[in-house]
Image: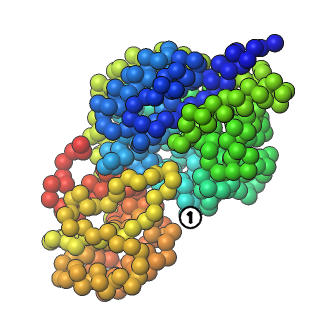
Amino acid sequence: MRNDRTLERLANATLLVPFESHHAPRWVLEGLADGVAGVCLFHNNLEGPEQVAALNARLSEAADTPLISLDEEGGDVTRIGQAQGSDYPGNASLGAVDDPELTRATLRSLGGVLAGLGFNLDLAPSVDVNVADDNPVIGTRSFGSDAALVARHAAASVAGLQEAGVAACAKHFPGHGATSQDSHHVLPRVDAAADLLHRRELRPFRAAVEAGVRSVLTAHIEVPALGAEGPATLSANVVTRLLREELGFTGTVVSDAIEMRGVSARIGIPEAGVRAVAAGCDLLCLGRLVYGEEVAAVRDALVAAVREGRLPGERLEEAAGRTRELRSWIRAAAPLRAAAAGSATGGIGLTGARRAVRVEGGLPSLSDPYVVEVEAPPGMAVGDVPWGLGPWFPGTERVAPLPDLAGEILDRSGDRDLVVVVRDAHRYPQTRELVTRLLDARPGAVVVEMGLPVWRPGTGTHVRTYGAAHVNGLVAAELLGARDAVGTVR
């Protein structure tokens, strides 16, 4: 019989833990030395390149090749670009270009940046097929709404990251793109037939598996047609039967953050962790605010579940073994990371953003334009990342999406050319009404959409960037003639 010490180390091997500061606390370093698989860093851990590199070097010293991960998708979801926005366009931009070689090279370059900072696992790419226009959690994180397009860019992304020696993680299995709710807050439900799900949602995951993706991250969504009554993360039908047996995935299955309400609201974080491992997950992502005592509670729950016979010890051993295999791949890929870190450049990000931008209507020659940005709430996955054209147009005004503000904006703009910047205007009726009122008075105004370009105003010029990353804003500013906008990224 396995003793408690053995069980504790096996349970530790399933944990991907966060922490609260710019420096690794003692409980994290001791945990890594005691078998904790690795860490996931968030914006609260990242102050600047030198600090991040030093932090990751310290973490690497605590154990033999711990997993050092983050959510770095490029585009809107960026951790290393949290302060100013990403130098790489996101999936929607790359999907709009639809050049898989560009996608591969972009992700290879991004992987090189991550490697240079000491990361070895990127919880990306998102390979969801975004078919719900009002999806609050995917949107521009998706390559698009066409399964074939998403599949070819899923494969390209996986190849690019892993050519840089950084393990990729295709998410959110079995597909979060048809939801209209955010699994950070609730348990979304996808009511689609099994044959449609296989043709649409699962196609990009098949492509990622065929491309050799080292890990796959599960979604906290309910998909009855796939046998998932309750969160897919906790469903053996989804994780084991579908992903393992049908799609043939042999790598590491990672849960989405276990503290998200879509999976843990009714049963609590420790129990969610137990059920996720029982269903077939190998690595539990514990989310941004699950620290020392909560991490210990998850480990203790796993040990207790084995002792009680609710979780087979063999399943815990299998999970720990898959995590070891991932770490072994990362160890062997060290020369790739060293080479990629020395060759990474943000220039390809600017190239991609330039190729992605689209303009409808004649782009006027603007002289001293008055730029107004209409506020849009950030999603939980995106966080508070700067966006818009303010860095290139001093005096840019940020306003609430209130239609009654139209008159004030027009008064303040005077005789200057008007540029209105929005983000996912299709999701916000008040934003659309405000823009419509402005265009009624100024039909020659320019509207810049930095989210999904679902809604097209009836007049004016429409600029579509397919993302709100720093590099997307720079390209829009170039088009509009901003001073100092032309050039390379930081």
Percent position of residue 202, x then y: 65, 44
330, above or below 481, in the image: above
490, above or below 304, in the image: below
410, above or below 389, in the image: below
Q: Residue at x 46, y 38 (%)?
A: 20
Farthest residue toward the right? 309
Percent position of residue 16, x then y: 56, 31
Placement of the N terminus among the 4 image quadrants: top right
Seen from the viewer's position, the closer of residues 330 and 395 is: 395
Query: Residue 80 sits in which quadrant?
Result: top left
409, above or below 371, in the image: below
Amino acid type assigned to the residue bearing label 1 in the image: Asp
Residue topped by disc 1: 134
Left of 301 or right of it: where is 367? left
Placement of the C terminus among the 4 image quadrants: top left
Q: Residue at x 69, y 38 (%)?
A: 270
Query: Residue 271 sits in which quadrant?
Result: top right
Element marked by disc 1: loop
Q: Residue at x 63, y 27 (%)?
A: 14
Query: Residue 436 sits in which quadrant?
Result: bottom left
Within 10 angstroms of label 1, few (less than 14), some, or many (20 or more) residues? Answer: many
State the count of labels. Answer: 1
- The answer to whether residue 306 of the structure is visible from this angle is yes
